Image (cartoon, helix red, strand yellow):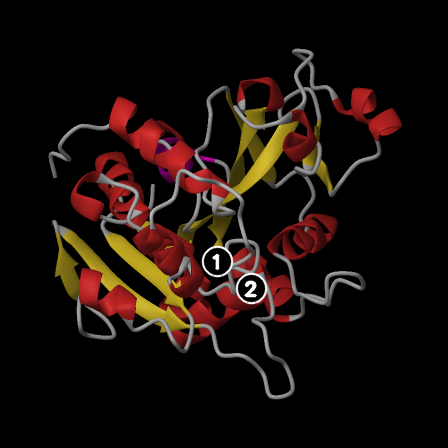
Amino acid sequence: MHENLIILAGGASSRMKKQSMSKNLSEEEITQANKRSKGLIGVGKDGRPMMDYLLYNAKRAGYTNIYIVISEQGELFKEFYGKKDKGNTFKGLTISFAIQYIPEGRIKPFGTADALYQVVEQYPELSEQYYTVCNSDNLYSYEALQALRTVKSENAFISYSRDALEFSSERISRFALAKLEKEGILLDIIEKPKAEEVEGYRDSSGKLRVSMNVFKFNGAMLFNDLKNCPIHPERDEKELPTALLNMLSTHPNSVLGIPFSEHVPDLTAKDDIAVVKEYLRKNYGELKW
């Protein structure tokens, strides 16, 4: 078991900043969507951000050390969760911040693998420890986070049933599919599979499994592939699944897919705001920290 959770919140939020025709948004929500990191958009009770709910689930799952990766303009996170760079106390959690710096010559961050590498560089102890890493704009259940914290496998990810995700078919079709052995061992992650290829990726139970970017890693095992992650030729970013698959080439059979069948609320675009607000209203009352 481990107690470290890394939350990636330093992305550019490009899709969230795109114009929306939705009539369900207030002017304040539109302003927040255009200016804030997605995890800080006020979708919860009393206008609290979705990050509150992710941290709440993390605490219920048994995590105590939280590392939030923010951008160089991410000071608003410190207004919510602690003014210091490291060692803030929030609702019984210890919260530290890492900055994902943008390399000279780029205008956008260098991707999720780069974000994770930068937090490990800023907190070197993580390179020798186990940790869970997840997105800031997905609300993972405490059961899923707990499964990753307690699993005995060196590395793991939540292998979500595609049928349980409450998104449009078009949106789901863009999610990465996991190719698994019978025992749930990860063989490959396939980005944007072609329609005619999909049926070939059903697992032993007949389910199509997708990754929603929540992983457990052995920090020492991943480090070199994280550091040397190549740039994706189309998206021009260093992507965490690429580092994971490169690690698999030298450490085969080291990543377990943990099967889950549940929805994962997602804040990708402005149209998601009303949907997530309603989900939180129905499924979360007062947070009992």
Q: Amino acid at mark 1?
A: Gly
Determine contact: label 1, label 2, CB under 8 Å.
yes
The stretch drawn in magenta includes residue 110: no
Quarter holding residue 124: bottom left
Residue at (61%, 23%) from the top-left corner? 162
Q: Is residue 92 visible?
A: yes
The residue closer to the viewer here, 251 or 67, is 67
Q: Amino acid at mark 2?
A: Phe
Provide the major secondary structure of the magenta segment: helix
**Residue 142, percent from left and from top:** 32, 32
The residue tagged 2 is: 223
- State left or right for residue 227 relative to residue 99: right
Question: Which SS class for mark 1?
Answer: helix
The residue closer to the viewer here, 253 or 21, is 21
- Residue 31's disc number: none
Residue at (35%, 71%) from the top-left corner? 74
Mark 2 surroundings within 10 Å by alpha-carbon count, few (fewer than 14), some (14 through 19), many (20 or more): many
**Residue 103, percent from left and from top:** 58, 83
Quarter holding residue 43: top left
The residue closer to the viewer here, 251 or 139, is 139
Picture layout, residue 170 above or below residue 229 = above
Q: How many marks?
A: 2
Residue at (39%, 67%) from the top-left corner? 70
Picture layout, residue 67 above or below residue 143 = below
Q: Quarter holding the C terminus?
A: top left
The residue at the far right in this view is 196
Residue range corresponding to the magenta coloring = 145-152
- Residue 219's disc number: 1
- State left or right for residue 235 relative to residue 21: right
Q: Is residue 142 visible?
A: no
- State left or right for residue 143 relative to residue 48: right
